[in-house]
Image: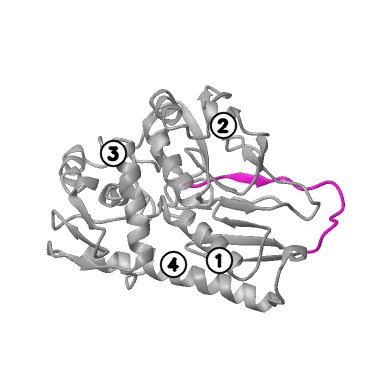
Amino acid sequence: MTLVVNARLNNTKRVAGDVLPLFFLFAILLISCTRQAERSQWVFSGPTMGTSWSVKIITDSLQSDTSRQTIETGITSQLEQIDSLLSTYRPDSELMEFNRERSLKWVDVSSSFYTVLEQAQEISQLSNGAFDVTVSPLVNLWGFGPELGKDTIPDAGVITQLLKQTGYQNLELDTEQQRIRKRIPELSVDLSSIAKGFAVDQVALSLEKLGVKEYLVEIGGELRAKGRNAANQAWRVGIETPTLQLQSVYKAIQLVDEGIATSGDYRNFYDIDGQRYSHTIDPETGYPVKHDLASVTVLAKSTMIADAWATALSVMGADKGYTLANQLQLPVLFIIRTGDKYTDKATSAFIRRKS
């Protein structure tokens, strides 16, 4: 099975890939098994969060008489709830209601909203601000928010002004009472670089509560697997070569009871006067990142964590990102572009994994 990344066009530029604003894309191929399936499975799919989702479950592993309809309803209900809380495209979402708030008072939030923010803030601190969910105004300015597209490079003065409205330090969390508040009225949050991973984890947990023991969950390219596939083998996935050309597998790996996410510059960008502008915004400068790092793939027990770290390390670049990932013992594969050629380097934790 291949996750097909469709191209969308606008009047001014080519926006490559599954251009769903601010959802940092993980272009990954699920490698088809060449042998006939030995165990039965159910396959589900549909739209969500501006992208698509798919789930495979091995029915032989079901430890209850849960029906197919019950499982599908559970998945879609879970995804609808998350979208209603964390979406930047729904004006009535909990996230957007918080963004419209201009006071500095404490705001009680749902457990899901708080969980995602808490994890985001932790990774912001560990990455020294490379990951920052408050860069929403800059992402919108550069044309990667709800309103796609830019004709010109934003004015430097505007970028400088908007930088004053960002900063993860300006978002305060109260763990005991599960509430949050702004330290500056203009602060706004966008969780697109972590929300898909969170949704994958939540769907996986809901499946387990229904008695599903072996599954593969995918949302917009972020994945989490448990158990073995229909051929009674470890789930195998292929990290895509970061190019606009014909999709191909750069490296195949096994996915064993863990999540995986990739952030890259080759699916969500636009060109102005021959210059590529990536969707990944550097929170320090307010500009799209400029380096030779084409993609970053991160593995973790939580897809939410993998999702956020993929973005953070993409901002940092190959050298700084590699150093930090090794220090934190994160399993990460960096793919670096030099002209039309690619090289890679993997952290020690990634190398130690079984491929």
Q: Earlier in the sequence, mark 1 or mark 4?
A: 1
User: What segment carries the magenta color?
Assistant: 25-40
| Main SS, magenta residues | loop
Residue 316: x and y, percent?
Answer: 37, 31
Q: Earlier in the sequence, mark 2 or mark 4?
A: 4
Identify residue for label 3: 129
Q: Earlier in the sequence, mark 4 or mark 3?
A: 4
Regarding residue 272, the answer to whether it shows in the image is: no
Please, what is the three-letter code of the amino acid marked with disc 1?
Pro
How far apart are the two marked residues, 1 and 4, measured between alpha carbons? 13 Å
Q: Secondary structure at mark 1?
A: strand
Residue under the point 42% across and 52% down: 194
Q: Which numbered disc, 1 or 2, marks the residue closer to the eye? A: 2
Q: Is residue 292 above or below residue 153?
A: above
**How crowded is the residue under tag 2: few (<14 C-alpha within 10 Å), some, or many (20+)?**
some
120 or 263: which is nearer to us? 120
How far apart are the two marked residues, 4 and 3, measured between alpha carbons? 26 Å
Q: Secondary structure at mark 2?
A: helix
Q: Is residue 343 above or below residue 332?
A: above
257 or 265: which is nearer to us? 257
Q: Which numbered disc, 2 or 4, marks the residue closer to the eye? A: 2
Is residue 53 located in the magenta-colored stretch of the structure? no
Q: Earlier in the sequence, mark 1 or mark 2?
A: 1
121 left or right of 100 in image? right
Residue under the point 58% across and 51% down: 223
Which numbered disc covers residue 82? Answer: 4
130 or 48: which is nearer to us? 130
Identify residue for label 2: 350
How far apart are the two marked residues, 1 and 2, measured between alpha carbons? 32 Å
Residue 100: x and y, percent?
Answer: 21, 66
Identify residue for label 1: 47
